Image (cartoon, rainbow, N blue to C red):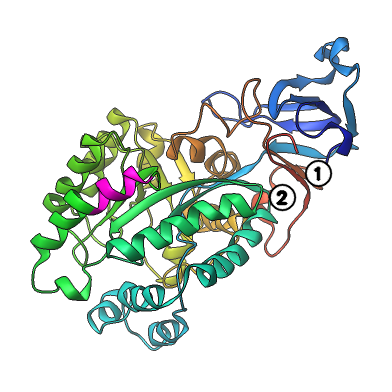
Amino acid sequence: MGDPDNQGGGETIWLNARLATLAGNAAGLGIVEAGAVAARNGRIVFAGPEQDLPHASRAGAGIVDCEGRWITPGLIDCHTHLVYGGDRAREFEMRLAGASYEDIAHAGGGILSTVRATRETGEDDLLRSALRRLDALIAEGVTTVEVKSGYGLDQPAERKSLAVARRLAERRPVSVSVTLLALHALPPEFSDDRAAYVEAVAEKTIPALAAEGLVDAVDAFCERIAFTPAEVARVFDAARRLGLPVKLHADQLSNGGAAALAAKYGALSADHLEYTDEAGVAAMASAGVVAVLLPGAFYVLRERQAPPAALLRKHGVPMAIATDSNPGTSPMTSLLLALNMAATLFGLTVDECLAGATRNAARALGVADETGTLQAGKWADLAIWDIERPAELVYRLGFNPLHARVWRGQ
Protein backbone atom coordinates (compact mmCIF):
# COMPACT_ATOMS: atom_id res chain seq x y z
CA MET A 1 0.00 0.00 0.00
CA GLY A 2 1.45 3.36 -0.94
CA ASP A 3 1.80 5.76 -3.81
CA PRO A 4 3.76 4.10 -6.62
CA ASP A 5 5.11 7.51 -7.61
CA ASN A 6 6.69 7.92 -4.18
CA GLN A 7 8.66 4.70 -3.79
CA GLY A 8 12.30 5.03 -2.75
CA GLY A 9 13.31 8.60 -1.97
CA GLY A 10 9.90 10.26 -1.85
CA GLU A 11 7.65 10.82 1.13
CA THR A 12 4.47 8.91 1.87
CA ILE A 13 1.91 9.83 4.53
CA TRP A 14 -0.71 7.47 5.87
CA LEU A 15 -3.65 9.51 7.22
CA ASN A 16 -6.95 8.76 8.92
CA ALA A 17 -5.51 5.85 10.85
CA ARG A 18 -5.61 4.48 14.35
CA LEU A 19 -2.14 3.68 15.61
CA ALA A 20 -0.73 1.16 18.04
CA THR A 21 2.77 2.62 18.14
CA LEU A 22 4.20 0.23 20.79
CA ALA A 23 6.58 3.10 21.57
CA GLY A 24 8.47 3.01 24.85
CA ASN A 25 8.95 0.07 27.17
CA ALA A 26 5.96 0.64 29.42
CA ALA A 27 2.86 -1.53 29.36
CA GLY A 28 0.25 -0.58 26.79
CA LEU A 29 0.11 -0.28 23.05
CA GLY A 30 0.74 3.44 22.65
CA ILE A 31 -2.64 3.99 21.02
CA VAL A 32 -3.34 7.09 18.94
CA GLU A 33 -6.99 7.23 17.85
CA ALA A 34 -6.69 9.80 15.06
CA GLY A 35 -3.20 9.21 13.83
CA ALA A 36 -0.83 9.55 10.93
CA VAL A 37 2.49 8.07 9.89
CA ALA A 38 4.91 9.79 7.52
CA ALA A 39 7.91 8.13 5.93
CA ARG A 40 10.79 9.46 3.85
CA ASN A 41 13.58 7.40 2.30
CA GLY A 42 12.21 4.29 3.96
CA ARG A 43 12.32 5.77 7.49
CA ILE A 44 9.52 7.04 9.71
CA VAL A 45 9.71 10.80 10.12
CA PHE A 46 6.45 11.18 12.05
CA ALA A 47 4.07 8.90 13.92
CA GLY A 48 1.44 10.41 16.14
CA PRO A 49 -1.76 12.45 16.21
CA GLU A 50 -2.70 13.62 12.73
CA GLN A 51 -3.33 17.11 14.07
CA ASP A 52 0.37 17.32 15.03
CA LEU A 53 1.64 16.36 11.59
CA PRO A 54 3.64 19.33 10.26
CA HIS A 55 1.72 20.88 7.39
CA ALA A 56 4.91 21.22 5.37
CA SER A 57 5.26 17.44 5.35
CA ARG A 58 2.24 17.11 3.10
CA ALA A 59 3.72 19.11 0.24
CA GLY A 60 4.66 16.72 -2.54
CA ALA A 61 3.99 13.61 -0.46
CA GLY A 62 2.04 10.59 -1.57
CA ILE A 63 -1.11 10.49 0.56
CA VAL A 64 -2.75 7.23 1.61
CA ASP A 65 -6.18 7.37 3.29
CA CYS A 66 -6.34 4.45 5.71
CA GLU A 67 -10.09 4.95 6.19
CA GLY A 68 -9.91 4.38 9.93
CA ARG A 69 -7.87 1.19 9.76
CA TRP A 70 -5.31 0.30 12.41
CA ILE A 71 -1.56 0.57 11.84
CA THR A 72 0.89 -1.40 13.96
CA PRO A 73 4.59 -1.94 13.50
CA GLY A 74 5.29 -4.70 11.02
CA LEU A 75 5.30 -8.03 12.83
CA ILE A 76 8.60 -9.72 13.71
CA ASP A 77 9.04 -13.50 13.89
CA CYS A 78 12.19 -13.73 16.00
CA HIS A 79 12.67 -17.53 16.09
CA THR A 80 12.24 -19.71 13.01
CA HIS A 81 13.95 -22.62 11.28
CA LEU A 82 12.59 -21.92 7.78
CA VAL A 83 15.37 -23.61 5.80
CA TYR A 84 15.26 -27.42 5.77
CA GLY A 85 14.68 -30.42 3.57
CA GLY A 86 11.92 -33.02 3.82
CA ASP A 87 9.21 -33.20 6.46
CA ARG A 88 8.46 -35.08 9.66
CA ALA A 89 4.83 -36.05 9.22
CA ARG A 90 5.65 -39.65 10.20
CA GLU A 91 6.91 -38.44 13.57
CA PHE A 92 3.67 -36.59 14.07
CA GLU A 93 1.88 -39.92 13.71
CA MET A 94 4.33 -41.54 16.15
CA ARG A 95 3.70 -38.79 18.67
CA LEU A 96 -0.06 -39.30 18.36
CA ALA A 97 0.56 -42.97 19.15
CA GLY A 98 2.33 -42.02 22.36
CA ALA A 99 6.02 -41.59 21.48
CA SER A 100 7.78 -38.73 23.26
CA TYR A 101 10.16 -36.19 21.74
CA GLU A 102 13.05 -38.03 23.39
CA ASP A 103 11.78 -41.45 22.21
CA ILE A 104 11.74 -40.20 18.62
CA ALA A 105 15.20 -38.66 18.94
CA HIS A 106 16.72 -41.82 20.42
CA ALA A 107 15.15 -43.87 17.61
CA GLY A 108 17.11 -41.87 15.02
CA GLY A 109 14.31 -39.49 14.14
CA GLY A 110 13.88 -35.94 15.26
CA ILE A 111 16.49 -33.40 14.23
CA LEU A 112 18.79 -35.98 12.63
CA SER A 113 16.14 -37.10 10.14
CA THR A 114 15.88 -33.51 8.94
CA VAL A 115 19.67 -33.27 8.84
CA ARG A 116 19.78 -36.18 6.41
CA ALA A 117 17.14 -34.62 4.17
CA THR A 118 18.74 -31.17 4.29
CA ARG A 119 22.17 -32.48 3.37
CA GLU A 120 20.65 -34.27 0.37
CA THR A 121 18.65 -31.27 -0.88
CA GLY A 122 20.18 -28.73 -3.25
CA GLU A 123 20.35 -25.04 -2.45
CA ASP A 124 17.76 -24.01 -5.01
CA ASP A 125 15.26 -26.59 -3.75
CA LEU A 126 15.86 -25.47 -0.17
CA LEU A 127 15.22 -21.90 -1.29
CA ARG A 128 11.95 -22.78 -3.02
CA SER A 129 10.56 -24.58 0.03
CA ALA A 130 11.71 -21.87 2.43
CA LEU A 131 10.11 -19.17 0.29
CA ARG A 132 6.73 -20.87 0.59
CA ARG A 133 6.99 -20.78 4.36
CA LEU A 134 8.26 -17.20 4.34
CA ASP A 135 5.42 -16.10 2.06
CA ALA A 136 2.90 -17.35 4.61
CA LEU A 137 4.50 -15.16 7.27
CA ILE A 138 4.71 -12.14 4.98
CA ALA A 139 1.00 -12.51 4.17
CA GLU A 140 0.26 -11.92 7.85
CA GLY A 141 2.22 -8.69 8.09
CA VAL A 142 5.68 -9.98 9.03
CA THR A 143 8.40 -7.55 7.94
CA THR A 144 11.36 -9.01 9.88
CA VAL A 145 12.20 -12.67 10.40
CA GLU A 146 15.01 -14.58 12.03
CA VAL A 147 16.14 -17.75 10.25
CA LYS A 148 18.31 -20.34 12.00
CA SER A 149 20.44 -23.02 10.42
CA GLY A 150 20.99 -26.21 12.43
CA TYR A 151 19.88 -28.89 9.99
CA GLY A 152 23.24 -29.29 8.28
CA LEU A 153 25.57 -29.99 11.21
CA ASP A 154 28.66 -29.99 9.06
CA GLN A 155 30.36 -26.94 7.62
CA PRO A 156 29.29 -27.35 3.96
CA ALA A 157 25.64 -28.04 4.81
CA GLU A 158 25.49 -25.24 7.37
CA ARG A 159 27.02 -22.88 4.81
CA LYS A 160 24.35 -23.97 2.32
CA SER A 161 21.54 -23.32 4.79
CA LEU A 162 22.89 -19.92 5.81
CA ALA A 163 23.36 -18.91 2.19
CA VAL A 164 19.73 -19.82 1.48
CA ALA A 165 18.64 -17.71 4.44
CA ARG A 166 20.56 -14.76 3.01
CA ARG A 167 18.95 -15.31 -0.40
CA LEU A 168 15.47 -15.06 1.12
CA ALA A 169 16.06 -11.35 1.67
CA GLU A 170 17.06 -10.99 -1.99
CA ARG A 171 13.85 -12.62 -3.19
CA ARG A 172 11.33 -10.95 -0.90
CA PRO A 173 10.87 -7.46 0.64
CA VAL A 174 11.66 -8.55 4.19
CA SER A 175 14.50 -8.13 6.69
CA VAL A 176 16.21 -11.43 7.53
CA SER A 177 18.42 -12.02 10.55
CA VAL A 178 20.56 -15.14 10.08
CA THR A 179 21.58 -17.31 13.03
CA LEU A 180 24.09 -20.16 13.06
CA LEU A 181 22.69 -23.05 15.12
CA ALA A 182 25.49 -25.56 14.56
CA LEU A 183 25.14 -26.87 18.14
CA HIS A 184 21.67 -28.30 17.54
CA ALA A 185 22.24 -32.06 17.63
CA LEU A 186 25.22 -34.38 17.50
CA PRO A 187 25.75 -35.45 13.86
CA PRO A 188 26.13 -39.19 13.24
CA GLU A 189 29.74 -38.91 12.09
CA PHE A 190 30.66 -37.60 15.56
CA SER A 191 28.47 -39.98 17.55
CA ASP A 192 31.53 -41.38 19.35
CA ASP A 193 33.35 -38.10 19.90
CA ARG A 194 31.23 -35.26 21.21
CA ALA A 195 34.23 -33.20 22.24
CA ALA A 196 35.65 -33.26 18.73
CA TYR A 197 32.37 -31.98 17.28
CA VAL A 198 32.09 -29.13 19.78
CA GLU A 199 35.72 -28.24 19.08
CA ALA A 200 35.10 -28.25 15.33
CA VAL A 201 32.10 -25.95 15.68
CA ALA A 202 33.99 -23.54 17.93
CA GLU A 203 37.31 -23.45 16.11
CA LYS A 204 36.37 -24.06 12.49
CA THR A 205 32.69 -23.67 11.62
CA ILE A 206 31.92 -20.42 13.44
CA PRO A 207 35.07 -18.53 12.32
CA ALA A 208 34.82 -19.74 8.71
CA LEU A 209 31.14 -18.95 8.20
CA ALA A 210 31.37 -15.65 10.07
CA ALA A 211 34.27 -14.63 7.82
CA GLU A 212 31.99 -15.19 4.82
CA GLY A 213 29.41 -12.78 6.24
CA LEU A 214 26.81 -15.50 6.74
CA VAL A 215 26.32 -15.20 10.51
CA ASP A 216 24.50 -12.51 12.48
CA ALA A 217 24.29 -14.50 15.74
CA VAL A 218 25.15 -17.90 17.22
CA ASP A 219 22.63 -20.21 18.91
CA ALA A 220 22.77 -23.57 20.69
CA PHE A 221 20.38 -26.17 22.10
CA CYS A 222 21.17 -26.68 25.77
CA GLU A 223 19.24 -29.73 26.95
CA ARG A 224 19.78 -33.25 28.26
CA ILE A 225 19.16 -34.70 24.78
CA ALA A 226 21.33 -32.04 23.14
CA PHE A 227 24.34 -30.21 24.63
CA THR A 228 25.58 -29.51 28.14
CA PRO A 229 26.18 -26.05 29.60
CA ALA A 230 29.94 -26.66 29.38
CA GLU A 231 29.70 -27.55 25.69
CA VAL A 232 27.54 -24.52 24.98
CA ALA A 233 29.98 -22.30 26.87
CA ARG A 234 32.81 -23.54 24.64
CA VAL A 235 30.90 -22.42 21.55
CA PHE A 236 29.71 -19.16 23.11
CA ASP A 237 33.31 -18.28 23.99
CA ALA A 238 34.21 -18.69 20.32
CA ALA A 239 31.30 -16.46 19.28
CA ARG A 240 32.28 -13.84 21.81
CA ARG A 241 35.86 -13.72 20.46
CA LEU A 242 34.41 -12.85 17.07
CA GLY A 243 32.04 -10.23 18.48
CA LEU A 244 28.94 -12.25 17.57
CA PRO A 245 25.85 -12.06 19.81
CA VAL A 246 24.45 -15.31 21.17
CA LYS A 247 21.05 -16.75 21.97
CA LEU A 248 20.00 -20.06 23.48
CA HIS A 249 17.36 -22.78 23.30
CA ALA A 250 16.96 -22.98 27.05
CA ASP A 251 15.19 -25.19 29.62
CA GLN A 252 12.63 -26.54 27.16
CA LEU A 253 12.42 -30.10 28.50
CA SER A 254 14.18 -29.82 31.85
CA ASN A 255 15.77 -27.23 34.13
CA GLY A 256 19.43 -27.48 33.29
CA GLY A 257 20.35 -23.95 34.26
CA ALA A 258 20.33 -22.83 30.64
CA ALA A 259 18.54 -19.54 31.30
CA ALA A 260 21.24 -18.58 33.79
CA LEU A 261 23.90 -19.58 31.24
CA ALA A 262 22.26 -17.32 28.65
CA ALA A 263 22.35 -14.50 31.19
CA LYS A 264 26.03 -15.14 31.98
CA TYR A 265 26.88 -14.59 28.32
CA GLY A 266 24.58 -11.57 27.90
CA ALA A 267 22.53 -13.41 25.32
CA LEU A 268 20.04 -11.52 23.19
CA SER A 269 17.42 -14.09 24.15
CA ALA A 270 16.68 -17.33 25.92
CA ASP A 271 13.98 -19.29 24.11
CA HIS A 272 11.36 -21.86 25.22
CA LEU A 273 11.96 -21.66 29.02
CA GLU A 274 9.24 -24.10 30.11
CA TYR A 275 11.34 -25.36 33.03
CA THR A 276 13.19 -22.18 33.98
CA ASP A 277 13.08 -21.44 37.71
CA GLU A 278 12.99 -18.08 39.46
CA ALA A 279 16.77 -17.92 39.81
CA GLY A 280 17.08 -18.27 36.05
CA VAL A 281 14.43 -15.61 35.46
CA ALA A 282 16.16 -13.22 37.87
CA ALA A 283 19.47 -13.77 36.09
CA MET A 284 17.84 -12.99 32.76
CA ALA A 285 16.34 -9.82 34.18
CA SER A 286 19.71 -8.63 35.48
CA ALA A 287 21.41 -9.30 32.15
CA GLY A 288 18.66 -7.84 29.94
CA VAL A 289 17.93 -11.15 28.20
CA VAL A 290 14.63 -11.34 26.32
CA ALA A 291 12.41 -14.38 26.91
CA VAL A 292 11.18 -15.80 23.60
CA LEU A 293 8.07 -17.92 24.16
CA LEU A 294 7.25 -20.59 21.59
CA PRO A 295 3.71 -21.87 22.06
CA GLY A 296 3.71 -23.84 18.82
CA ALA A 297 6.25 -26.34 20.14
CA PHE A 298 4.47 -26.48 23.50
CA TYR A 299 1.25 -27.32 21.67
CA VAL A 300 2.64 -29.88 19.23
CA LEU A 301 4.62 -31.69 21.93
CA ARG A 302 1.58 -31.60 24.22
CA GLU A 303 3.71 -30.30 27.07
CA ARG A 304 2.13 -29.71 30.44
CA GLN A 305 4.49 -27.22 32.04
CA ALA A 306 4.15 -23.76 30.55
CA PRO A 307 6.90 -21.13 30.66
CA PRO A 308 6.87 -19.10 33.90
CA ALA A 309 5.05 -16.07 32.50
CA ALA A 310 4.14 -14.79 35.96
CA LEU A 311 7.79 -14.88 37.06
CA LEU A 312 8.94 -13.21 33.85
CA ARG A 313 6.34 -10.50 34.43
CA LYS A 314 7.33 -10.15 38.11
CA HIS A 315 11.00 -9.62 37.26
CA GLY A 316 10.35 -7.39 34.27
CA VAL A 317 11.80 -9.71 31.64
CA PRO A 318 10.55 -8.69 28.18
CA MET A 319 8.54 -11.47 26.55
CA ALA A 320 8.66 -12.05 22.80
CA ILE A 321 6.56 -14.56 20.87
CA ALA A 322 7.60 -16.48 17.76
CA THR A 323 6.40 -19.34 15.59
CA ASP A 324 9.50 -21.57 16.01
CA SER A 325 8.54 -22.69 12.51
CA ASN A 326 10.31 -26.03 12.02
CA PRO A 327 9.50 -29.44 10.53
CA GLY A 328 9.28 -31.45 13.73
CA THR A 329 8.00 -29.67 16.80
CA SER A 330 6.30 -26.56 15.43
CA PRO A 331 5.28 -26.94 11.76
CA MET A 332 3.55 -23.57 11.91
CA THR A 333 3.81 -20.56 9.63
CA SER A 334 1.29 -18.24 11.33
CA LEU A 335 2.54 -15.68 13.81
CA LEU A 336 -1.04 -14.58 14.43
CA LEU A 337 -1.86 -18.13 15.56
CA ALA A 338 1.19 -18.05 17.84
CA LEU A 339 -0.21 -14.90 19.47
CA ASN A 340 -3.50 -16.63 20.20
CA MET A 341 -1.67 -19.65 21.59
CA ALA A 342 0.47 -17.46 23.84
CA ALA A 343 -2.65 -15.87 25.27
CA THR A 344 -4.65 -19.08 25.58
CA LEU A 345 -1.93 -21.49 26.69
CA PHE A 346 0.49 -19.21 28.54
CA GLY A 347 -1.85 -16.56 29.96
CA LEU A 348 -0.36 -13.52 28.25
CA THR A 349 -2.49 -10.42 27.82
CA VAL A 350 -3.37 -8.90 24.46
CA ASP A 351 -0.89 -6.08 25.06
CA GLU A 352 1.86 -8.56 25.97
CA CYS A 353 1.17 -10.60 22.85
CA LEU A 354 1.31 -7.63 20.51
CA ALA A 355 4.46 -6.29 22.16
CA GLY A 356 5.86 -9.80 21.90
CA ALA A 357 5.59 -9.82 18.10
CA THR A 358 6.88 -6.26 17.62
CA ARG A 359 8.87 -4.29 20.22
CA ASN A 360 10.18 -7.22 22.27
CA ALA A 361 10.82 -9.38 19.21
CA ALA A 362 13.02 -6.59 17.86
CA ARG A 363 14.95 -6.61 21.13
CA ALA A 364 15.37 -10.36 20.88
CA LEU A 365 17.12 -9.85 17.54
CA GLY A 366 19.16 -6.85 18.62
CA VAL A 367 17.40 -4.57 16.12
CA ALA A 368 15.23 -2.48 18.46
CA ASP A 369 16.96 0.70 17.29
CA GLU A 370 15.78 -0.01 13.75
CA THR A 371 12.29 -1.48 13.94
CA GLY A 372 9.57 -2.85 16.23
CA THR A 373 7.78 0.42 17.06
CA LEU A 374 6.25 3.34 15.18
CA GLN A 375 8.79 6.04 16.00
CA ALA A 376 10.67 8.63 14.01
CA GLY A 377 14.04 7.35 12.81
CA LYS A 378 13.07 3.70 12.56
CA TRP A 379 12.36 1.83 9.36
CA ALA A 380 8.88 2.38 8.00
CA ASP A 381 7.84 -1.23 8.56
CA LEU A 382 4.06 -1.17 8.97
CA ALA A 383 1.13 -3.55 9.07
CA ILE A 384 -2.28 -2.06 8.24
CA TRP A 385 -5.26 -4.03 9.51
CA ASP A 386 -8.99 -4.28 8.80
CA ILE A 387 -9.96 -4.56 12.47
CA GLU A 388 -11.97 -2.60 14.99
CA ARG A 389 -9.62 -3.15 17.92
CA PRO A 390 -6.12 -4.61 18.34
CA ALA A 391 -7.42 -7.55 20.40
CA GLU A 392 -8.73 -9.07 17.17
CA LEU A 393 -5.15 -9.85 16.16
CA VAL A 394 -4.88 -12.15 19.16
CA TYR A 395 -8.43 -13.40 19.58
CA ARG A 396 -9.33 -14.73 16.13
CA LEU A 397 -8.27 -18.14 14.80
CA GLY A 398 -7.66 -18.83 11.11
CA PHE A 399 -8.44 -15.23 10.22
CA ASN A 400 -6.04 -12.85 8.53
CA PRO A 401 -7.23 -9.23 8.63
CA LEU A 402 -4.13 -7.76 6.97
CA HIS A 403 -5.09 -4.96 4.58
CA ALA A 404 -1.58 -3.92 3.56
CA ARG A 405 2.02 -4.45 4.52
CA VAL A 406 4.71 -1.79 4.20
CA TRP A 407 8.41 -2.64 4.32
CA ARG A 408 10.86 0.24 4.49
CA GLY A 409 8.24 2.64 3.25
CA GLN A 410 7.14 0.56 0.26
Give how far across and how far down residue 129 sits, in percent.
Answer: 56, 70
Q: Nearer the viewer, residue 346 or 68?
A: 68
Q: Main secondary structure of the magenta part?
A: helix
Q: Which mark is residue 388?
A: 1
Kind of residue at disc 1: Glu
Q: Quadrant of residue 301?
A: bottom left
Q: Quadrant of residue 71?
A: top right
Q: On the image, which quarter does residue 340 sit in?
A: bottom right
Q: Is residue 150 visible?
A: no
* Residue for point 62% across, 66% down: 132
> Pointer 2: residues within 10 angstroms few (<14), some, or many (20+)?
some
Q: Left of 92 or right of it: where is 315?
A: left
Q: Quick check: 25 left or right of 137?
A: left
Residue shown at 84% from the left, 31% from the top: 6
> Which quadrant of the rendered structure holds the N terminus?
top right
Residue 392 is tagged as 2
| Magenta-colored span | 205-212
Residue type, numbered disc 2: Glu
Label 1 residue SS: loop
Between the C-alphas of marks 1 and 2, the distance is 8 Å
Q: Position of residue 171 (x, y in %)?
A: 63, 54
Left or right: where 19 falls relative to 135: right
Seen in the picture, residue 276 relative to 372 is either above or below; the reply is: below
The number of callouts visible is: 2
Secondary element type, mark 2: helix
Question: Where 193 sits versus 324, above or below?
Answer: below
| Residue 406 falls within the magenta-colored stretch | no
Q: Which mark is residue 142?
A: none
Q: Is residue 205 visible?
A: yes
Task: Name the residue located 46 percent from the left edge and 78 percent from the top edge.
Answer: 86
Give 360 or 135, whichever is nearer the viewer.
Answer: 135
Residue 354: horizontal and vertical position, in percent? 59, 42
